[in-house]
């Protein structure tokens, strides 16, 4: 049985303190920001998934519908790229949405190999439900956040998103 020199300090605790000692305060602030953004994204996804599950709508389905709302008529391949999914997975997702009669796929007028995706009128109540559920989530998540704070957060997040979407330099 080996004895540790300091039984009150774990190896993990020692490693964390060693890393923290090497990091400057600006790095820690940035890492805290990105970690918080990641955690918030996870919490939002979990909350949305929970509220959509009661309506038998999966995460991938509501995500695809939101993309299609903004980019109706997009090709299946373009949608797959937007969602960062494989084309086969996207095709199966679209099959499920088509079976619910929420979307339709049509051949492109110029290239019959390309299939474009369009929303159907039957999906309108789904978007109404999503909007109602979204308002409840907004109310809960943005509690105690002023409109000025919200505007600043949005502006900052848009800048971060634009930077993340730019090709890496170097």
Image (cartoon, rainbow, N blue to C red):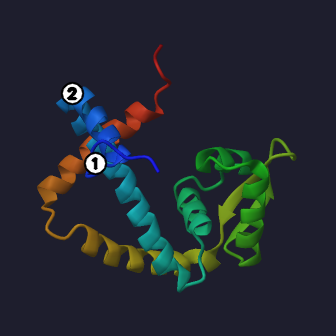
Where residue 139 sits in the image (x, y, percent)? Answer: 26, 74
Say which of marks 2 and 1 sits in front: 1
In the displayed structure, 122 sits above or below 82; it is below
Q: Is residue 85 left or right of residue 51?
A: right
Q: Is residue 23 visible?
A: no
Q: Which residue is mark 1?
A: 9
As drawn, the residue found furthest toward the right would be 112
Q: Is residue 136 above or below residue 159?
A: below
Residue visible at 66% across and 53% down in the picture: 73
Task: Determine the secondary structure under disc 1.
Answer: loop
Q: In the figure, residue 156 lies in which quadrant?
A: top left
Q: Circle 2 sits on which residue?
A: 24
- The span from disc 2 to disc 1 (Cα, nearest Å) is 23 Å
Name the foreground residue: 21 vs 33.
Answer: 21
Image x and y of residue 160, in percent: 34, 37
Q: Nearer the viewer, residue 168 or 21?
A: 21
């Amino acid at each position: 049985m080996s004895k540790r020199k300091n039984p009150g300090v774990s190896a993990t605790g020692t490693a964390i303190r060693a890393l923290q000692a090497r990091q400057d305060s600006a790095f820690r602030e940035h890492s805290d920001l990105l970690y918080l953004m990641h955690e918030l994204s996870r919490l939002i996804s979990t909350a949305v998934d929970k509220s959509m599950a009661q309506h038998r709508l999966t995460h991938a389905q509501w995500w695809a519908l939101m993309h299609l709302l903004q980019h109706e008529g997009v090709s299946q391949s373009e949608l797959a790229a937007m969602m960062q999914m494989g084309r086969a997975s996207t095709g199966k997702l679209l099959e499920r949405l088509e079976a619910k009669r929420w979307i339709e796929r049509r051949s492109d007028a110029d290239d019959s190999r390309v299939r474009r995706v369009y929303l159907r009128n039957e999906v309108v109540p789904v978007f109404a439900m999503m909007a109602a559920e979204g308002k409840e989530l907004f109310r809960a998540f943005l509690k105690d956040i002023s409109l000025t704070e919200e505007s600043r957060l949005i502006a900052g997040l848009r800048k971060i998103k634009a930077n993340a979407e730019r090709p890496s330099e170097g």
